Amino acid sequence: MKFILGTKQNMTQLFDEEGKVHPVTVIKTGDMVAVQTKTKIKDGYDAVQVGFGTKSAKRINQAQKGHMKEGNYLYLKEIKDTQAGVGDKIESTLEAGDIVAVSAISKSKGFQGVVKRHGFHGGPRSHGQKHSEREPGSIGAGGYQRVFKGRKMAGRTGGDRVTVKNLVVMHVDKDAQEIYVRGAIPGRTGTLVEIRG
């Protein structure tokens, strides 16, 4: 399985050989370094923990320095069923034309009402309605003295792990360490992105 970590940059567009334009998201990649190996005997499953990105040494505590040993990594992620030893560099093997799934944390929008959160159309703009254009309306039958679980209501929106499948890698720039993926992906600029092929 192909796996690479990166950070979301910006959106742009690419033209193919036929002159068709494709909207693409630029993902900045880099070297992933194996920090820890997990085995089925000791941990119950086979995996490799990799470090990606860098941050200031003063922002890493002593326990993390002992665990990461050589680098000041910003992110630590696990890749299952991968053969790599501690200290090995794992490079991207993605190529143009590959079909990938991209996972990231979506933009957080804070506390939102039902119109923005769930797409409710709100109340009518006439016929005696004054202050209920964006209200939720009835929340169910009366007499139960409680709100049923799963009821769509206002609340915190965004900030969830979202996976978008069947995206196409349009171009790989190995010199600049950038991957151009067709379409939009979740998150803001700088969000950690997982690409699996």
Image (cartoon, helix red, strand yellow):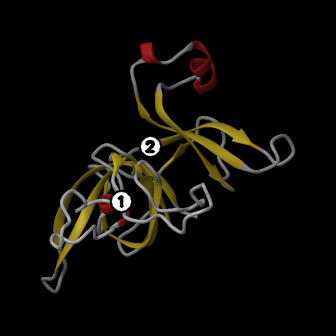
- For mark 1, what is the residue? 114
Q: Which mark is residue 31?
A: 2
Q: Considering depth in this image, is 175 or 171 the residue closer to the camera?
A: 171
Q: Considering depth in this image, is 159 or 103 the residue closer to the camera?
A: 159
From what the image shows, is residue 107 above or below residue 128?
above
Using a 10 Å C-alpha cutoff, classify the residue at mark 1 as few (fewer than 14 neighbours), some (14 to 19) or many (20 or more).
some
Using a 10 Å C-alpha cutoff, classify the residue at mark 2 as few (fewer than 14 neighbours), some (14 to 19) or many (20 or more).
some
From what the image shows, is residue 91 above or below residue 121?
above
Quadrant of res 81: bottom right
Looking at the image, residue 140 sits to the left or right of residue 22; the answer is right
Report x, y in % for residue 179: 32, 58
Disc 1 element: helix
The mark tally for this picture is 2
Report x, y in % for residue 78: 61, 46
Sequence-wise first label, 1 or 2: 2
- On the question of residue 93 being in view, the answer is no
Distance CA(mark 1)–CA(mark 2): 42 Å
- On the question of residue 116 being in view, the answer is yes
